[in-house]
Image: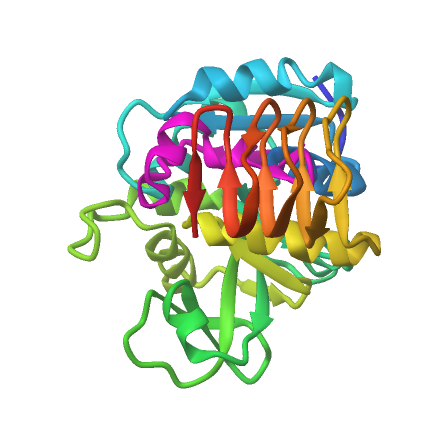
Amino acid sequence: MSTATYQGVILAAGHGSRMGPFGEQVPKPIAPICNKPLLLYQLEHLKSLGVEDVIIVIGHLGHRIQETLGDGSAYDVNIRYVEQEKRLGLAHAVGQIEPHVDRPFILLLGDIFFDVPNLALMPEVFENHPSAAVLAVKEEKDPEAVKKNFNVYLRGDNTVRRVIEKPRHIENLLKGCGLYLFDLPIFDAIRRTPRTALRDEYELTDSIQILIDLEYAVRVARVVEWDMNITYINDLIDCCVYQLDKLGKTSLIGANCTIPSGTELIHSVLGDNVTLTHPATLERCVALSGAAVPSGHHKNTVFTPDTAWNA
């Protein structure tokens, strides 16, 4: 077993029901962001902290995730898979990994694309201040973004006083971002977590609040520059456009693509073996590997080998 300080855990069992038929074909955790599966970005985040041992919790189309990442050797990590057989919420999913965890662990939600340039601050906070958990947070400008996630309330000493899942009313704009560092007491809290009326699930925020109520210190780290929960087709496009801007590119083209003269690509990404039989204009479009793109002006569209989905 690895002797690294932390283990890594990625929750990748979700079902992309709000992405329509696309979500039935492609698990959100391996949706391609600039031709790279989302989970590979998350593995890179973990590796930047020296994490070598990674547990991925799978469910919907889990075999596709296993086929994509394998045992992790291609990425210099060791990956083990744990199946969440019933979709009973994030706390339930974390509870499934307890037999496989023997030290503090970094937890990421596998359907969120993170830009976290200062991720090392999380273990720094954890190691310099006794804590049972460190929550990655971000000061939002849009209150609706907080209401879609969870709100974090702090005490005067910057420890967390309260977390509220999907609040209807908020008093600040501090958002929890689906990235955590937990010590082992989280499993005690999960065992005490009731099933809630909000979504008839075991909510991880309830487990965090139980930690707080048991007088464990929970702290925050402002490490998230940008994040996007991939819920709808347009979210995938937004992630690709954001990453294109980070790469300093206006478009990205995979290998062995057929692109006629006169084609215009504007903030668009083509995977491998994409075929355009006639000139076309693609604006904020993503074509997955093997897709065929018809002529015309396309905007906010994801093309797969079978069909096209408009955002």
State the image coordinates of residue 13 (x, y, percent, origin top left): 41, 31
Q: Which corner quadrant holds the N terminus? A: top right
| Along the viewing direction, whichever of 306 and 249 lies nearer the viewer | 306
Badge count: 0
| Along the viewing direction, whichever of 72 and 283 lies nearer the viewer | 283
- Residue at 38% of width from left, 25% of height from top? 59
289 is higher (above) or lower (below) than 125:
above
In the image, is 202 to the left or to the right of 76? Answer: left
In the image, is 142 to the left or to the right of 127? Answer: left
In the image, is 38 to the left or to the right of 84? Answer: right
* Residue at the outermost right position: 248
**Image colouring:** rainbow
| Along the viewing direction, whichever of 300 and 21 lies nearer the viewer | 300
Res 110 seen here: no
| Along the viewing direction, whichever of 209 and 213 lies nearer the viewer | 209
292 is higher (above) or lower (below) than 148:
above
Specify the segment rendered in magenta.
8-37
Residue 164 magenta-highlighted: no
State the image coordinates of residue 244 (x, y, percent, origin top left): 74, 52
279 is higher (above) or lower (below) than 30:
below
The quadrant where residue 101 appears: top right
State the image coordinates of residue 27 (x, y, percent, origin top left): 45, 30
Residue 22 magenta-highlighted: yes
* Residue at the outermost left position: 197
- Residue at 33% of width from left, 37% of height from top? 92
State the image coordinates of residue 303 (x, y, percent, origin top left): 51, 36
Res 215 seen here: yes
